[in-house]
Image: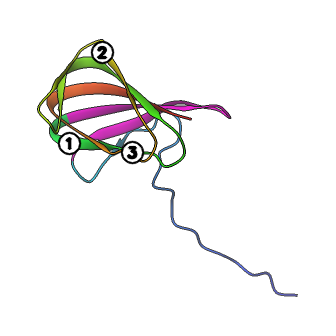
Amino acid sequence: EALDVMTLKKSEIPTLNEQKVLANGSKMRILTKNGYFTAKEVVIENSEYLIYSEESFVTFTVADGEAKFESGETIKKGETWFIPAYYMAKITAENATLVVTTI
C-alpha cells in the first residue's frame, strides 16, 4: 500500500518565545499560551498594529514606550485597555512594546 504524504506550510504563528517579524515591520512573540488565554509581546517600531478578535475581547498593556490610537489619543506606559470583540483598534508608535492578551 502506498502512503499519502501531505506537505503543509509552516505556521504563520510563531512558537513560544520565537520572534516573528510582521509585514509592517513590527515584531511579535508568544509569551505564553494555554487553554485559557494567549499572551503576545508586540514591539512596534515606526509602524502600526491592528488589534481585533471575533471570539472575545482583547486586552493590551503598554509595557514600554508610548503609543497612540488612530483617533490620536495617547496610550502611556503602564496603561491597560480592553478592546471589545468585533471592534478593531489601530495602534501606532515610533517605539513601543505591548503585551496583547486574547482568550
Q: What is the spatial separation of the Cα atoms under label 3 and label 1, in whole angstroms? A: 13 Å
Secondary structure found at label 3: loop
**Residue placed most toward the observer, 81 or 6:** 81
Is 7 left, or right, of 69 in this rendering? right
Q: Measured along the vertical axis of the image, is residue 2 above or below residue 46? A: below
On the image, the x and y values in percent for residue 83 come to 39, 34
Place residue 27 in its image quadrant: top left
Q: Main secondary structure of the magenta part?
A: strand
Q: Which residue lies at the image location 47% right of the left edge and 45% below the top edge?
A: 14
Q: Which residue lies at the image location 28% right of the left edge and 25% below the top edge?
A: 97
Neighbourhood count class around disc 1 (C-alpha, 10 Å): few under 14, some 14–19, many 20 upward: many
> Residue under circle 2?
79
The numbered mark at residue 52 is: 3
Q: Are marks 3 and 2 in contact (CB under 8 Å)?
A: no
N-terminal of the pair, mark 1 or mark 2, is 1
Magenta stretch in the rendered image: 25-44
Indicate yes or no whether the magenta region holds residue 28. yes
Secondary structure found at label 1: strand
Give the quarter of the figure containing the N terminus: bottom right
> Residue under circle 1?
48
**Residue placed most toward the observer, 72 or 100:** 72
